[in-house]
Image (cartoon, grey):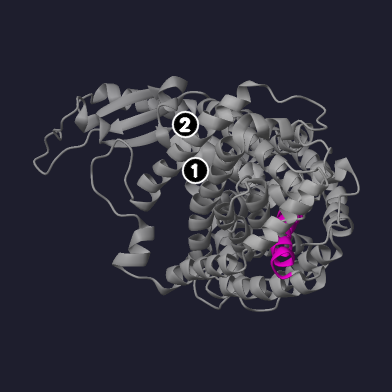
Amino acid sequence: MASQNETWSSRMGVILAVAGSAVGLGNFLRFPGQVAQYGGGSFMIAYFIAFLLIGLPVCWIEWTMGRAGGRYGFNSAPGIFGAICNSMGARFVGVIAFVVPVCIYMYYVVIEAWCLAYAVNYLRGVMGFEKSSEATAFFGSLVGISENGSAVHFDVQHVGIYFVAVFALNFFLIYRGISKGIEFFCKFAMPTLVLIALVILVRVLTLGTPDPSMPDRNVDTGLGFMWNPTKNYLVERAVGPDGKPLQGQEDDYSWNHGTHQEVVEAKNIEAAKAKAAANPEKYRFEEKGILAQLGDFDLWLAAAGQIFFSLSVGFGVIITYSSYLGRRDDVVLSSLAASSANEFCEVGIGGLISIPAGVAFFGVAGLASMGLSTFGVGFTVLPMVFAEMPLGQFFGFAFFFLLFLAAVTSSLSMLQPGIAYLEDAFLINRRRSVLILGVVTGIGGFLVIYYSANLKLLDTLDFWVTNLLMVLLALAQVILFGWVIGGKKGLKEAQLGSAIRIPPVYGFIIKYITPAFLLLTLLGWFYKSVLGQAFGDDQPKVSDKIKDLFIDPNPIAWTGVGMILILLIAAILMVPSKRKIQANINQTKKMGDSL
């Protein structure tokens, strides 16, 4: 069994560490783009519903199961699941909690290196881009997006040297242990991160209208673009080869299957209305309110996906972190506090920086043309914003250093489940487990850097791990907690030593609502992203992921899938034996400390 000498030194330390695992690139880059794409009002309704029905219940489950598993002498999910469920089959489900964080770390540490590279180059004063094409070219050169192997150079404008630096930093801190490494760093990094973010936020919100000749380009317009509950579209009717409207089974078939172009800014909306009025047979202007947007299943998939990214649920991180708690250490309020800290960083800070700043300088149309994806916002739009902003080099450095700190707190959390599993499986000390994991993740990280063309390997790992394995792990945890352990018994365990009580309605939610929500999310993702279908579209399609694996096999895509499968097989072979788990169960029962 793993050493039980390691514990958190303070309650605040574990809260900051768990919050640090959640606060990352998704808060400051991915979340703003999601809000802008799906409409602020409707997305936030779906987002908070997903938080209440998925995020918070799974957080409570992971904190509770981890703390209980720690009493049986296990700090990794396979042993924890096997012991607290008294089920040998459950331990095999737990191997997903090893594969997910280790796989994510292999490419996340590379993105972490990008952030450090941008911060350093801002300090060098070489980031004064005048065109978006220049910002895109710098990013492409840094990460080697044009050719495999082109990023493996050890100079300040390529990612190689930064990868070595951040990889070494992560393993130095993880080697120091729970309290002296992870907790120590998070106690420094999290307050620093929030302070830097608040300084940047104040600067963004006081930008006003940078160019008086373009009054529509201001911070208020940016906030409106993100949070406006109504979406406006100019629809061009779909026609066949004969020029006549397409016919289908449902009413308005030709309109529903026409081209929907989102229209933003007052002058563009008025122009779209005039165009539709002048040619009503070809164009139609549509307003889509909150209720209509909430009927879009894609929006719910995006909101649920953001919750997974945001709270680090389904990562296997929280269950390991909480295994180092004492039997009566609070998990209910601590979980709520860590989740709230993450939501503050995401909604209260991240949601008010990137998009409003971009709109203030480039307008909504200009921002949309640059892209609202995570990488588009972070590594193309924001460098252009800082180039236009007074003291832009300083604020650019501050922002990317902020991202770097957030990334380190997250990547540290991804390593600890792997360390704990190696200790549980082989009964080895931390030094040896750190060495083994360092070799494994070092090889994986190098492959991600080397096979950098179009970021194919990174994208493949991210697609299958974060969309499939994370949701499967969360679903398995909910079923084990609500049905195998039993909801009442599980909630009773959660409330041992708790500062607040979990509302009784969550017993019903955890048993029925959360697993149903997760299952629908998984099925919806499979239908849309794997099969390549679109909701409301009856045209057969095949997704790029299926093409890369089976129709037009891509060796890099298969390399990514192979890396996942190798880790999965290795984790299964390392799973704690039935004898070991039963011995720990018996020992804990003798001490009167079993679940």
Q: Is residue 581 left or right of residue 180?
A: left
Query: Where in the figure is residue 292, as x and y percent of width and height?
Result: 40, 23
Q: State the residue position of label 2.
A: 264
Question: Residue 420 colored magenta?
Answer: yes
* Residue at horizontal 75 percent and vertical 75 percent from the top: 435
Nearer the observer, 24 or 575: 575
For badge 2, the amino acid type reads Val
In the image, residue 216 sits, relative to residue 463, either above or below, namely: above
Q: Is residue 495 left or right of residue 357?
A: right
SS assignment at label 2: loop
User: Dot 2, crowdedness within 10 Å: few (<14), some or many (≥20)?
Assistant: many
Nearer the observer, 279 or 495: 495
Q: State the residue position of label 1.
A: 368
For badge 1, the amino acid type reads Ala
Nearer the observer, 375 or 392: 375
Label number found at residue 245: none
Q: Quadrant of the C terminus?
A: top right
SS assignment at label 1: helix
The boundaries of the magenta stretch are: 402-426
Quadrant of residue 527 within the rendered picture: top left
Residue 391 seen by the camera: no
